[in-house]
Image: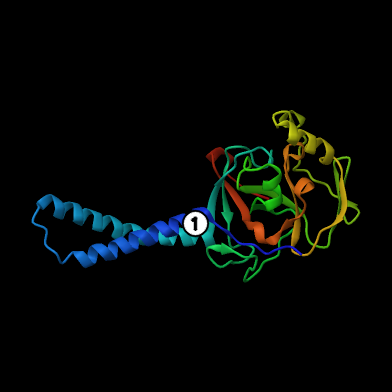
Amino acid sequence: MEVQIFYIDSIELKIFILGCICFFLTILFAITSKYTFKNYYTVKVFSNLYSLFESLWPVLIIASLIMFFCIQAFKIPTGSMKNTIIEGDHIFVSKSHYGIRFPFFQIGKRYFRNSIKRGDIIVFQAPSKAMTMFDNKLKKDFIKRCVAIEGDLVEIKNKKLYINKNKIEEPYIIFNKEDVSIQNTKQNIILENKKNNFGPLIIPKNHYMMLGDNRDFSYDSRFWGPLHDKYIKGKALIIYWPIYRWRILK
């Protein structure tokens, strides 16, 4: 039985905590404002700090809630999704597309759920198995394409994807062996053994098969297994930067 763990969305939580600190400092300054400071510079500094904290706390708290519930920006660090998304692309991700979680802790339960569909490009927290295999060398967040949902029979034969015994045409994928050469020895061994053939495997309930579009340079479900729903953060919507690469992702 898989243990249902929770994790903290650190960016949103840090901004929220900073907003709360500014709020309490604003209250503290408001309480102490009745005291008269004789020194002109002390009064000026006090007044400026009060104005700063009073302006900051609502902005920070609202921003943290927007990032958790609605839209968050991500920068792509690797080439695992070439040529759909390349290194350095900045994307917007809809955090509420598949439903709403309780902030700021992810416990697997999602309200007002929408179904995850095959072909969706998804940002998710790196599963614990993936992080264990490569220690802390990986980024916290991954971005991959969902190719199969719960109940699907998945198999990869000679780099060709089969879902429920039907060969799937994937016009968006590339095979770039040159990229693999920059990986370390342990990654090379795993990639060479598993990248071309996988399964057959029936995807468990509340799990999804995630693959990178750049199949020879993607550390994905072929190596750490189907992804549990609890790790999913949101659906990638658009590339917004650099401006010449602006496009809706699909």
- Left/right placement of residue 250 relative to residue 24 reads right
- Using the image, determine if residue 199 lies above or below residue 16: above
- Using the image, determine if residue 19 lies above or below residue 250: below
- Left/right placement of residue 187 relative to residue 50 reads right
Numbered label tally: 1
Which residue has dot 1 on it?
12
Residue 57 x, y percent position in the rendering = 35, 60
* Residue at (63% x, 71% y) in the render: 112
* Residue at (59% x, 67% y) in the render: 100
Colour style of the rendered protein structure? rainbow
Quarter of the image for the N terminus: give it: bottom right
- Left/right placement of residue 159 relative to residue 98 reads right
Residue 33 x, y percent position in the rendering = 18, 64
Residue at the far right in the pictured view: 165
* Residue at (56% x, 68% y) in the render: 102
Q: Amino acid at mark 1?
A: Glu
Residue 158 x, y percent position in the rendering = 89, 40
- Mark 1: give few (<14), some (14-19) or many (20+) Cα within 10 Å: many
Q: Quadrant of residue 84?
A: top right
Report the front residue among 182 and 134.
134
Residue 75 x, y percent position in the rendering = 56, 43
Residue at the far bottom in the pictured view: 112
- Using the image, determine if residue 161 lies above or below residue 231: above
Circle 1 — which element? helix
